[in-house]
Image (cartoon, grey):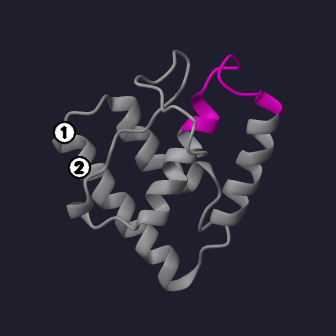
Amino acid sequence: MPEDATKPEETPDGAAVFPLIPEELGVHPLLLAALHAYVFLEGSEATVLNPAVADEAMEYLVGYMQRLNGAELRRVREDFITLVGFAKSEDWPKQHVRFLQDFLKENGIGA
């Protein structure tokens, strides 16, 4: 971000934002970064970002995640189990818990 750019105080209406995940959960930071980007790109309204650009970025994001295999894929699966447990313990809405439970399958990751 350029030095003279101002940070918005609040998330703009129509922007989809994933909740902050505490570091102590031990979930891989790159997975969290990808999830935050995924939620923003997939869930934000057209008033926030260009849908065609968001779709293209989503294709790349999911395509890269589909490359996971072996120990990396096992780690991601374990991290999702951790995230689901955290979401349940924090009483996240059921649709958010379901999103985490179904994420890998819905996106063809590890199929």
Does 46 appear in magenta? yes
Q: What amino acid type should be assigned to the residue bearing mark 1?
A: Glu
Q: Quadrant of residue 47?
A: top right
Q: Residue extending furthest front?
A: 4
Q: Nearer the viewer, residue 52 or 108?
A: 52
Assign a secondary structure to mark 1.
Answer: loop
Q: Nearer the viewer, residue 106 or 8?
A: 8
Residue 12 image label:
none
Image x and y of residue 21, in percent: 31, 50
Q: Residue extending furthest left?
A: 89
Q: Which residues are magenta?
A: 40-52
- Marks counted in the figure total 2
- Going 58% across and 29% down the picture, which residue do you hit? 43
Assign a secondary structure to mark 2.
Answer: helix
- Going 42% across and 75% down the picture, which residue do you hit? 75
Q: What amino acid type should be assigned to the residue bearing mark 2?
A: Phe
Q: Are marks 2 and 1 in contact (CB under 8 Å)?
A: yes
Does 10 appear in magenta? no
Left or right relative to 107: residue 82: left
Spatial CA distance of label 2 from label 1 is: 6 Å
Q: Residue extending furthest bottom?
A: 71
Image x and y of residue 42, in percent: 63, 35
Left or right relative to 87: residue 111: right
Left or right relative to 4: residue 53: right
Query: Mark 1 — residue?
Result: 90
Q: Is residue 46 above or below residue 57?
A: above
Image x and y of residue 36, in percent: 49, 46
Quadrant placement of the C terminus: bottom right
Within-10-Å neighbours for mark 2: few <14, some 14–19, many 20+: some
- Going 58% across and 45% down the picture, which residue do you hit? 38
Query: Mark 2 — residue?
Result: 86
Q: Is residue 69 above or below residue 52?
A: below
